[in-house]
Amino acid sequence: MLTNTQSSSRNAMRQIQASQLQLGEIDIANITFNPRSRDDVPQLLRGLQYIYTQDDVRNEVFSLLEKMIPAKIDKNNGRPGMYLWSVLVMGLLRLNLNWNYDRLHEMVNEHKTIREMLGHGLYDEKRYSLQAIKNNAALLTPEIINDINEIVVKSGHKALKKSRKKTKPSMADAIRSSLKHT
């Protein structure tokens, strides 16, 4: 598990993600998906896995998410809040798949891969209440999702540029190069 994913304050009530794996928990980077599935849930979860595994993207997204916490909430006082990673996962599932809160409640408590993405292991019995889901998933607005999309698209463009530089030169490049030397 990534150790730099806690929020800046050591005793913060709202953390980005747990810093240590629990018994039976799978690292988010190692979650596997059925490659033949045409359902939209695994596709969205793969996108979330990309955000989680790319340090620069993850850090930028979590900086954005920390800004969405209402100002009236003291991050260093009170009971621990839901992890920001869980808020992101639930909010994206709700808005991208057009789920109501009842459907989201059922899926985050019963769907194996979604629970793994939320950081719950095989032996983790934690269940989310409907009210906790409503209070937290509602923090992720369409505007914040648009900002996250911009971050991910920018990252994709960088990755595409890197992959183009690593590819073999085309036949046209080889011809141009040979003409320059003649």
Image (tube, helix red, strand yellow):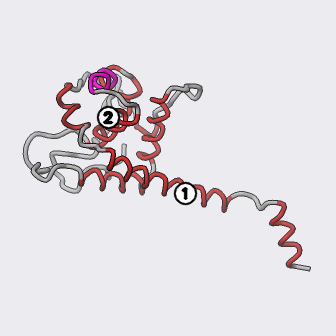
Left or right for 151, reference 78: right
Residue situated furthest right in the rendering: 182
Q: Few, some or many C-alpha atoms within 10 Å of disc 1 (few <14, some 14-19, many ≥20)?
A: few
Query: Does residue 106 show up magenta in the picture?
Result: yes
Residue range in magenta is 101-107
Q: Nearer the viewer, residue 49 or 149?
A: 149
**Residue 22 seen by the camera:** yes
Quadrant containing the C terminus in the rendered view = bottom right
Q: Nearer the viewer, residue 159 or 31?
A: 159
**Do the numbered discs 1 and 2 sit on residues whose CB atoms are within 8 Å?**
no
Query: Does residue 1 show up magenta in the picture?
Result: no
Q: Which mark is residue 90?
A: 2
Q: Amino acid at mark 2?
A: Met
Q: Nearer the viewer, residue 100 or 37?
A: 100
- Location of residue 15 in the rendering, given as x and y in whole percent from the top left corner: 23, 46
| Mark 1 vs 2, N-terminal side | 2
Which residue sits at x=43%, y=54%?
150
Circle 2: element type: helix
Left or right for 164, reference 150: right
The residue carrying mark 1 is 157
Where 139 falls versus 163 (above or below)?
above
